[in-house]
Every structure is written in C-alpha cells, then in structure tokens.
Image: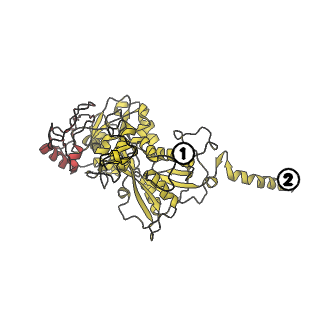
Chain colours: A yellow, B red
Amino acid sequence: MRISILLALLLGAAAPALAQSDGGTPNCSDLPNTLWLQIGDTQEPLIEYLGQALLNSAVEPMTLVYVTSGSCTNVDAMYNNTPITVTPKYIPTQAQMPGWTPAMPAPTCNNTQAGHPIDVANAALFVSTCDPSTPPADVELVRGPNQAYALVVPSASSQTAMTAEEAYFVFGFGSQGEAQPWTDESHLFIRTITKSTLLTWAAAIDVPAAKWKGVQEDTSTEVLNQVAQSTSPEATVGLLGAEIYDANRSSLKELAFQWFGQHHAWWPDSSSASYDKKNLRDGHYAVWSPTVWMTHIDPGTQVPVDPRTEYFINLILAKEQTPAFDTNTLDIVIGRGLVPDCAMKVTRSVEAGPLSLYTPDEPCGCYYDSKTGTSSCATCTDSSTCGGGTCRFGFCEAQ
Amino acid sequence: MRSLLALALGLSLCAACGKSSNETPDAGSDAGPDFADGGCYTNPTTSYEIINACTDAGYVDKSPTLPLLLPDGGLPPLP
C-alpha cells in the first residue's frame, strides 16, 4: 500500500515533465506563437529559411510548425478543414537546438492526439489541377512565387537533354517506349500522383499522372538519393523541383527540356551552370507552376481569420506591410530558387497552359538579375534618376 | 493533339528557332522584324512565338530516334 502510494506520487511528479519533453522533443503546444503549415516538400527550404527569419524577428515573431505532404493532399485538407495529426517539424531557436541552420533537417515536436488546424496550406501547382471545383467560400488562394520542375540524371550520365516526345515515350510507355537509354522502368524515379512534381510534368508531356511508368517515390529526398546513387547512370532519370536540384547540383545533372513546338532544349536557367531562371522567366523553359498559398478567411468580410496568416503570406510575396518586417524576404525567395511574380516576363493560367507576355505591376527583374548574376539596369536611390521608371530595391525598373 | 499542332506550326513557320549554339551566347537579338535572323522571334506575342523567341541563353539540340512515333510524326495513344 505504502509502495503504491509512493509510485503514484512519483508518477504524478513525473507527469508534467513527460508532458513537456519526450526525450528532448518539445510539445508543439509549448512553442511560442506557432503558425501551422501543411506544405509541399519542394517548399521546405523556403519555409526553413523564412522560419528562421520569423523566429529572429523583433516585429512579428512566429514559430513555424509544419508538415510536408502532396500538394493535392494539402488542397483537400484545407478545403475540408482536416487537422494536422501527424508529428510535425518546427523551426527551432538556438536555445532549443544549438547550431541549427536552415540547411539542416528541422526537428520534430509532439503533436496532440486531436491534432491542430492548418493555418496555411501550400500547393506547388495550379490548385485547379488537383480540384477544378470552386474553392470553399472560407478559403483564400494566393498565387505566390513560381517554381520550375526539373528532369535530373546522375552526374555520371552522358545525357544532356530530353524532348517532350521522348518524355512521352519514356514515362508513358516505360520499357515498351523504345526511347533509349531510358527503357528500364526500375530506373525512372517519379513521384506519387498527389505531388505537384509529377502532376506538373504530367500536364507538360500529355501523360496523365495515373498512367506514368516508373518507381513512385513519396519524397523529393528519395528521388534525389535514388538518382544520385544509381548504379546504372545512363538509364536513370528522375523528377525534382528545381530548388531541390539547385541545392544538390554537385551530385546530379539537370537535363535541358524541349517542349512540344520548340526547336531546342532549354534549362530553367540560361545555362547549365547558372542560377538565373532566365528561361523560366521568359518562357523558354515550359515546365513550371506557381506556388499557391491558402488560408481561411471570413466569407463575409473576405478577411483572414488569423491576421498572422496574411502577414506570413505577404512575406512570401515580399509585399510591403505594417509593421515592416526586419528581413528582406525577397532575398529568401530568390535564394531558394523560386521566381517571384515581380520578376516574371510571361504568365499562364492553367497547368502547362499557353504562355502570354506579362508585365508585373511592380517589376523587380533588375533586382532579381542582380541577386542571381549581374544586372544591366542602372542603380538608384530614388526614382528621379530612372528616366520615367521606378527605383525599386536599388535598381531602375521600367515602371 | 497539342504535339501535332505544335509540329504543324513549327514546320510552317520556323525552321530553326533560337540563335545560340550549345551554351554559347550569340550576338543578341535586335529589334528587327519577327521571325528574322535564323527563325527565332524578336518580338514574340503568341505562346508559340514566346517559347521560340530569340535569346542569348544556351541550349541543347537533340533529335532522338523514337521508333514508336506515327508516320506523320504524331504520338500514338498511351497503352
């Protein structure tokens, strides 16, 4: 009797500690000012860098807690208010994880059994590709930076390009496609059918996602590892978001791609060695989609239910807002291989749809060029020296 | 369907769009008439012209052998 009372007392004393820490893993609910995200895994680098800036912010500090999943899964979860019930990752402080940088995997926190509602969801493609119906009245869709999708091969491969017709036979026919050297389906590393990477490529080469041949991988990391470590480099090809490829160029090679109707094959960048996304921006590289950011709004007022979600999404859009954020988030977006809308020269309205010329309301192409290579634009401190143009981010833009 | 349309457009309008050799910048595009200087478009307006516009970016030329292409160059139905 006395022993059981003692045990109960001990367990009772231990309970709060267990609730706070499971072998050093914090409870998500104990983290300060959390914003819960469900994103495509191609957007994880952006979220890690942006999350660190938010954590260190003096004006709008937040702790990003996030899970990665397929874009179409994320759309469905947002539309149907499905909570996050799995174990999420979070952006840690230096006190929580000394030495952590956004280049490292983010740690996890303990979720509750009931889960937590999604504050912001992300799809890395046109939402209509996942669900063509009108979005629910309480969900706002915001078009964000644009992302290229890449065909990657092992560094040891001698291949340099693939045409859309080739891709049609490689991924639509597999071993029966006779498109050398990619005729072994066990060396075609694709994604599952809820993932933006597969769906965007599917639209680009006219092979419906459900008909693709190859090994379906759940994560970008798995594709990356399978391609990089392939023992048959010539026969191997995989699909990745360009920013994942950009961060791993030393172990992979990107194929130039020739879309239907084109006469040459192009990289997203102006060369295989550059990072300027010139060909995405001007339409020569066709396989790209906008990222879309979703949050809940009041259907009556159209105002976000949680104002922090609007602030967060505006950081991704690099919009000026109040209070002004203490980091230039445009640099974070550009640095992760994404192309902000303000740097685009073409646009489209559906997946793999026709391109049209585009002039952003507030262009930032000169600044974008300066961050990814060199800009030929004049530098400025105000618009008076821009000959009718506008000084923006230190460069004279056309308007 | 899209591939056939693109092929027809390409054959009728553009024999060699693009100006650069492999990863070698060219002399740049001037403001000449459309479809000048080897077939690329200097002032593109349509989607076809945009994807074949003149540029100083590098590119790769490839003419793969695809035994399953239809005699007219079109794509067969998927299995």
Foreground pick, A317 / A179: A317
Residue A285, x across and y down, in percent: 29, 43
How far apart are labels 2 and 1 at the CA level?
49 Å
Q: Secondary structure at mark 2?
A: helix
Foreground pick, A115 / A280: A280
Protein chain holding label 2: A
Q: Residue furthest front?
A: A384
Residue pictured at 54% horizontal, 55% vertical: A35
The residue at which mark 1 appears reads as: A52
Q: Secondary structure at mark 1?
A: helix
Residue pictured at 36% horizontal, 40% vertical: A379
The residue at which mark 2 appears reads as: A3
- The image shows residue A365, relative to residue A272, as above or below, that is below
Mark closer to the chain start, 2 or 1: 2
Protein chain holding label 1: A
Residue type, mark 2 in image: Ile
Q: How many marks?
A: 2
Residue pictured at 45% horizontal, 36% vertical: A225
Foreground pick, B38 / A253: B38
Residue type, mark 1 in image: Gln
Task: Tell me if A24 is positioned left or right of A162 in this view.
Answer: right
